[in-house]
Every structure is written in structure tokens, then in C-alpha cells.
Amino acid sequence: MNNKLIVVTGPTAVGKTELCIDIARHFNTPVINADSRQIYRDMTIGTAAPTPQQMAAAVHYNVGILNINEYFSASLYEQMVMTQLDEIFSHQTTTPNGNKVALLSGGSMMYIDAVCNGIDDIPTVRDDIREDLKRRLSQEGLQPLLDQLSKLDPEYYNIVDRHNYRRVVHALEICIQTGNTYTSFRTNAPKERPFDIIKIGLNRDRVELYERINRRVDMMMEMGFLDEVYRLLPYRHCNSLNTVGYKELLNYLDGLITLDQAVEQIKSNTRRYARKQLTWYRRDESIKWFKPDHNKEIMTYLSQL
């Protein structure tokens, strides 16, 4: 197959952006961003979005394209990126080896998986059903929704994380809208893709990675992260802000913790998220691992393309 998709992934703060700019410039291809929070506008500091200088060095797709309150999902991301890949491959010049190369980079596991393996074809939920369940969750709490799910889809009820309200609500949305179980839509069968996938994983020694995470959080605070969160207060109910960094600073603004406590919690929760990412990636034996500063070694590996 002549179409090749390079996927560069790794834990948060490992150093993906600069390497991907080098790869993008080498193959004259854009960077397709796979970060579920960098896709939103007005969250540039807290998500460590590519800087204007980095965006100028290589074309980036899917950075700052959505409003804070817009609904988005891994399924919608899959559809969007597959369209973008069709466009890239149709206009891309071939390498000396006769291939066309595209580049996907990010740390959002579900987004990477959506492009590489596909997501089950689950119907888009009607707004009235989504709003009704959101209202019920707010007024009644999670338990009545769990009780309803146990009746409508007992199989999924037995395996779902019952503390994860988003998964519970989404399953109920599908059950209510379709009249069928959510389980019936979950095939978990990988989709065939019209391109080969070359996965590169970046990692560092744990101590080094944790130091980078801590330094990055300190830099975010110096850059005005707290002011960014303050400006977003009118949107605090939006799912886009239900993420590390924003949650802790919102707790500070609510007077629940001190600013020093918020910063330490951001560092701790970011380190925990990095461990979760690495656990996820280790299941994938197709990933070839490198240290981010081994640029020459990585480019030699990619020279096959």
C-alpha cells in the first residue's frame, strides 16, 4: 500500500511537538493533531497547545477549531480525520520510495485509536435526549440513571465503570434513542484502513518525565494559566473544561483549596495521567519506542518511507 500514516504518540510533556515539526517538514505534510483538549479555542495555556511559532513552522490541523461549549466525540474526530487524510493523500507528492505520507500526533488515546482502528457505528444522539439526561443527572444524581441502565442494558451495566457518569449517560442515550441495547452497537471489530500505519512511541525515564511535567505546570502558571481559567468561568459546566489543570484551578477559584494546593494537585494528576497513557500504549505491540531526542535514529527508521 502506497499511503502511509505515521502516528507519533506518547505521554503528556514527553516532547512530541518539536519532533513532529521535523517529521512534517521532512515529508512536506501537515501535522494532524490528536489532542482532545487542544481542539478547543481559548484553552491554549492549560492544554500546552502548539505556539504560533510552532504553527508557523508546520501546518497543524485540528488546533483551536471548536468553541468551548461545542459537543465533540472520538467518533466525530474519526470522521473528520478520515476526510482530512483523503485530502492529504490526494494532494501529497510521493517520496523517492513511491509512497505518500501523512502524520498524526497526540496523546489522546481514544482519538489515536479512533483513527487507527475505527469506532463502532453508534448513532448520533438527539439534542432533546441529551439535554433531558443531563437535567436528570443534575437533579436526581447518578443512581437513578444506573437503575434505568440495568433494566435497558443489563449486559453493559455489568461491565461499565459505574462511577464514570459520562459512560453511563452515553449508554442510556443510545438505549433511549434506538430502543436497542448499547451493547448491540459495540462490535469492537477493527476497521480496514486504506493506508499502512507506522506507530512511533516517545518516552523518557520516569524521573525525567515527571520533572518535565512539574516544570511545564510552573511555566503554565507563569504564562497566565489562572487568568485563562478565570476568563472561562462562564463555561465551567462544559465537558471541555473537565480536565486536569482546569478542574484544580476552578476548585481554587471556588475557595475549596489554596493556589499552592491547586498547583501541586495539577502536577500530581498530570503525572497520574501520564502513567495511564503509558499503560494504554503498552498494550499495543506495534508501537516502536524511541527517546524524543534521538531525532537522527527516528528519521533513519522513517527513511523506509
Image (cartoon, helix red, strand yellow):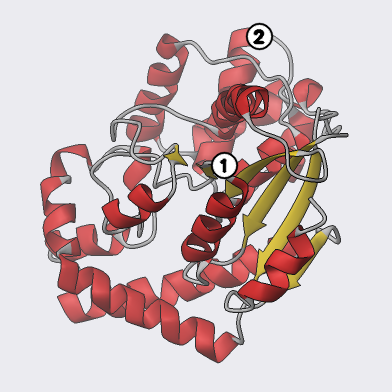
Residue at image position (76%, 22%) is 185
Distance (Cα) linking label 1 and label 2: 41 Å
Task: Return the residue found at the far front.
Answer: 96
Above or below, 184 against 272 in this view is: above
Give the image location of residue 205, x and y in percent.
61, 87
Q: Secondary structure at mark 1?
A: loop
Q: Which residue is mark 2?
A: 178
Crowdedness near tag 1: few (<14), some (14–19) or many (≥20) residues, C-alpha within 10 Å: many
Look at the image and tell me in which quarter the N terminus lies: top right
Q: Nearer the viewer, residue 31 or 12?
A: 31
- What is the three-letter code of the residue carrying label 2? Thr
Residue 182 is situated, as x and y percent measured from the top left of the image, at: 71, 24
Most extreme residue toward the bottom, as rendered? 207
Return the residue at label 1: 29
Disc nearer the start of the sequence (1/2): 1
Between disc 1 and disc 2, the foreground one is 1
Q: Give the residue at x 66% y 33%.
A: 93
Asked whether residue 258 is in view, the answer is no
Label 2 SS: helix
Task: Name above or below for residue 80 compared with residue 267.
Answer: above
Q: Is residue 145 left or right of residue 268?
A: right
In terms of depth relative to the viewer, which is nearer, 273 or 299?
299
Q: Dot 2: within a 10 Å radius of its alpha carbon, few (fewer than 14), some, or many (20 or more) residues?
A: few
Is 223 left, or right, of 166 in this rendering? left
The answer to whether 96 appears left or right of 221 in the picture is right
Residue 143, position as x, y percentages in the image: 51, 39
Q: At 38% from the left edge and 19% from the top edge, which residue is drawn?
A: 131
Residue 227 visible in the picture: yes
Quarter of image, res 136: top left
- Label disc, if present, on residue 235 of the rendered structure: none
Q: Nearer the viewer, residue 159 or 287?
A: 287
